[in-house]
């Protein structure tokens, strides 16, 4: 008997398809109902018809495909053009950066050349500054003012190095002059680098001007000092020109124009060296000549020239000057020289005579003791004996004479000149 539920409306049995899925011990039954099969069939039919219709449409309307391809080509070309523009811009930026870097490198090289030139000049100037200091000359204080705090901060290590170069005191001999660091120039922004270049160039230029100003001031000072020393020496009767020209005796040769560099610094250095040589020569000559006092602080009891002889009571010539001194008081050499007499000599009693060169000699008489011997080298201020009253003397004192080419001259001229030269020789 047929179950009414298994029949359709017209009395035919309804067939159900069962899909059995087995996996191991598990078995699943999936019943495929007719309406499900119909739905899938309809979906596949519709999709197939839609695909065939679209394909046919596109086949028949190939202009749409061409338009789409053309649009894609335009988009690709636009994209490639945009890429080309961006690449060109990048190339221009890179080229500009390379050019800027080359300009920076060139400026750095120029600054390095200026710095090295200043260091070389500093080395050349160092010896002259030492000589000037020994001669009692003082270079002027640099006029450069430190940069503003903001500028100094932007310069960093390079700014500090420049400030060290512009320091108020010169580095000691043997110490390295601080080197400038140019790393901030190469790593900073172009506008920052330009400002730093301007600051460094100004600082180096200021340092160069200070160097030139120091050289000029020292040259003038050395020349004026030498001129004043020469003037004082001439008033004491010394032929200064002959003294200074002694070292040039025996020279000769055809005249050739001097070789001089085009650099103003080299010319200034030569002028300063010449001025210092003249000053040094005059100082050495002045220190060797008898410009000292044989009995400092002692009063003069008898001057140079005619006087009443203490023994004969009539007019007689006194070839020197007498200083009041107690027996045993120090008697000093008045200049550098060589002892040519150290013995008892008639009316002089115990006598010491010193040859100072250039025809100038000094005599010290009536000594109680002689502390040097013939041939000794003495310097100004050395003790050569003790005051006394030996020889033709009425009491303890120091008899002092200055002779030029064997002829007695008034020692007062040398004593006065010596007092004026004190500030130039010490």
Image (cartoon, helix red, strand yellow):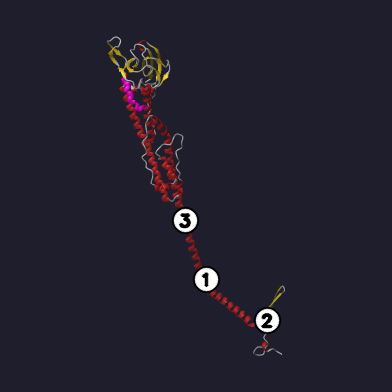
Q: Where residue 385 sits in the image (x, y, percent)?
A: 40, 17
Alpha-carbon neighbours of circle 3 within 10 Å: few (<14), some, or many (≥20)? few
- Judging depth in this view, the residue of 98 and 178 nearest the camera is 178
The residue at which mark 2 appears reads as 17
How far apart are the two marked residues, 2 and 3, measured between alpha carbons? 71 Å
**Mark 2 or 3, nearer chain start:** 2
Q: Is residue 29 magenta?
A: no
Q: Is residue 71 visible?
A: yes
Tell me the element at label 1: helix
Q: Nearer the viewer, mark 1 or mark 2?
A: 2
Q: In the displayed structure, would residue 241 be above or below residue 219?
A: above
Q: Are marks 2 and 3 in contact (CB under 8 Å)?
A: no
* Residue underneath mark 3: 90
Q: CA distance from mark 1 to mark 2?
A: 46 Å
Q: CA distance from mark 1 to mark 3?
A: 37 Å
Please provide percent x and percent y for residue 34: 64, 82
Is residue 362 found left or right of 94 in the rendered image? left
Residue at image x 41%, y 44%? 200
Q: Which mark is residue 65?
A: 1
Give 309 or 157, whichever is nearer the viewer: 309
Question: Which residues, given as a range, are shown in magenta?
Answer: 412-426
């Amino acid at each position: 008997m047929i179950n009414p539920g298994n029949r359709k409306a017209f009395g035919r049995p309804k067939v159900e398809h069962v899909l059995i899925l087995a996996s191991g011990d598990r078995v699943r039954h999936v019943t495929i109902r007719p309406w499900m099969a119909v739905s899938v069939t309809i979906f596949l039919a519709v999709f197939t018809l839609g695909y065939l219709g679209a394909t046919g449409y596109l086949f028949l309307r190939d202009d749409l495909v061409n338009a789409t391809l053309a649009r894609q080509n335009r988009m690709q070309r636009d994209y490639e053009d945009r890429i080309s523009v961006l690449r060109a811009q990048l190339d221009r930026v890179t080229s500009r950066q390379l050019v800027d870097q080359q300009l920076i490198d060139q400026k750095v090289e120029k600054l390095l050349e200026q710095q090295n030139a200043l260091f070389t000049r500093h080395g050349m100037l160092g010896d002259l500054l030492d000589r000037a200091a020994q001669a009692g000359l003082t270079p002027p204080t640099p006029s450069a003012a430190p940069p503003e705090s903001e500028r100094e901060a932007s310069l960093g290590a390079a700014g500090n190095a420049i400030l060290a170069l512009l320091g108020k005191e010169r580095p000691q001999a043997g110490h390295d002059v601080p080197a400038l660091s140019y790393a901030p120039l190469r790593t900073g922004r172009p506008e920052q680098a330009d400002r730093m270049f301007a600051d460094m160039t100004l600082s180096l230029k200021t340092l160069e001007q200070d160097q030139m100003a120091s050289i000029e001031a020292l040259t003038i000072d050395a020349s004026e000092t030498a001129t004043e020393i020469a003037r004082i020496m001439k008033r004491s009767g010394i032929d200064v020109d002959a003294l200074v020209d002694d070292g040039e005796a025996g020279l000769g040769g055809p005249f050739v124009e001097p070789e001089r560099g085009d650099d103003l610094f080299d010319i200034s250095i030569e002028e300063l060296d010449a001025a210092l040589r003249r000053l040094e020569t005059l100082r050495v000559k002045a220190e060797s000549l008898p410009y000292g006092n044989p009995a400092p602080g002692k009063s003069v009891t008898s001057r140079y020239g005619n006087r009443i002889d203490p023994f004969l009571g009539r007019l007689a010539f006194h070839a020197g000057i007498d200083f009041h001194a107690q027996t045993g008081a120090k008697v000093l050499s008045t200049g550098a020289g060589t002892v040519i007499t150290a013995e008892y000599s008639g009316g002089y009693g115990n006598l010491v005579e010193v040859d100072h060169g250039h025809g100038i000699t000094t005599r010290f008489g009536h000594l109680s003791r002689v502390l040097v011997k013939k041939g000794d080298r003495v310097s100004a201020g050395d003790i050569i004996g003790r005051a006394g009253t030996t020889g033709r003397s009425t009491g303890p004192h120091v008899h002092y004479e200055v002779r030029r080419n064997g002829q007695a001259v008034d020692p007062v001229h040398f004593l006065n000149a010596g007092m004026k030269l004190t500030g130039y020789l010490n």
